[in-house]
Image (cartoon, rainbow, N blue to C red):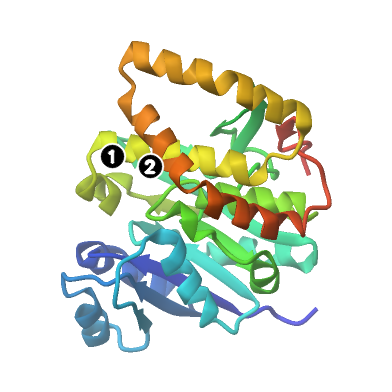
Amino acid sequence: MKQLSATIIIPNWNGKHLLEKHLPGVIREAEHADVMVVDDASTDGSVQFIRRTHPKVRVITKRRRHGFAETVNVGVAHVKSDIVVLLNSDVEPEPGFLTPLLPHFSDPNVFAVGCLEKSVEAGSVVLRGRGEAMWRKGFFIHWRGDVDKYDTAWVSGGSSAFRKKLWDRLGGMDTIFNPFYWEDIDLSYRAYKAGYRLVFEPRSIIGHYHEEGKIRREYTPRQVQRIAYRNQFFFIWKNLADPKRILEHCLWTPFRMFRGILSGDWPLLAGYVSAVVKLPRVFRSRMVSAGLWTKPDPDRLPEREI
């Protein structure tokens, strides 16, 4: 098998302080990979900083800010390598992280491989990167899984590698999820339903400093909740095909809305309304995805350990 080429893409929006801290570490680990920063119309001098201090890093600039999914898609469109590695601007890889990551792609059916994240949260380190999920009462419930297995329900868009050829076939990340959240779960689920494999690699380690990230700095908790709820509905309406679970979703959604009113969960109600407004676009996206489905909706993901 020929050696696979790789490009590391870092999406950035007003993250100069993060690039100053973490970009040198990414460059050190990119001995056999190109590094690209895709800038989502920053105003903090990020682009000038990169060009001045790291001239070998390729910079792609956008004139208007759109969000994570579109920024990543713009970057991947400029890549000619076999493998695309996505790293958030608030992460830094540990030495040798690419070495165990890339060999998984010797299996042509592998679409993506996720890294182990040492996530710094409230002064402690939480091990993340492997996910589990299931359909329950018409909703897709997901949670952090144990990191001692090699299967996963999804790969994180901030610390993972993707096969470029399959990324293009699947259409990349869906920009309906802009500005953030659920786009990586959606892409992973679409890959699963198209018959491809997802892998978790615990030996490929990334430090993830969430509290430095732009979401926490630029959005209020209620705004983040509203977007997350909205995107959850987008995901369900785009991907769910099992008639029984569709019926469950239709029956349980009014109950969930009523419970939200009683509990004062206004981000849930606002998220639902903003999702309904975009139903025509959701169904257009669904029609595109459905053309690639080869597998039914599973009860649970991952289905088995690999």
Q: Secondary structure at mark 2?
A: helix
- Residue at the location (44% across, 34% down)? 272
Q: Which mark is residue 227?
A: 2
- Residue at the location (25% across, 63% down)? 15
In the picture of the structure, the residue carrying the numbered disc 1 is: 223
Asked whether 31 or 194 is in front, the reply is 194
- The reply to whether callout 2 and callout 1 are in contact (CB within 8 Å) is yes
**On the picture, is 46 further left or further right than 115?**
left
Residue 27: % across, % down: 40, 75
Residue 158: % across, % down: 46, 56
**On the picture, is 279 further left or further right than 303?**
left
* Quadrant holding the N terminus: bottom right
| Residue type at tag 2 | Ile
How packed mark 1 is, by other alpha carbons closer than 10 Å (few <14, some 14-19, many 20 or more), is some
Residue 267 in the image: above or below residue 98: above
- Residue at the location (26% across, 86% down)? 51
Instruction: Locate residue 3: give its quadrant.
Output: bottom right
How packed mark 2 is, by other alpha carbons closer than 10 Å (few <14, some 14-19, many 20 or more), is many
Residue 94: % across, % down: 45, 59
Q: Secondary structure at mark 1?
A: helix
Instruction: Locate residue 137: give its quadrant.
Output: top right
* Quadrant holding the C terminus: top right
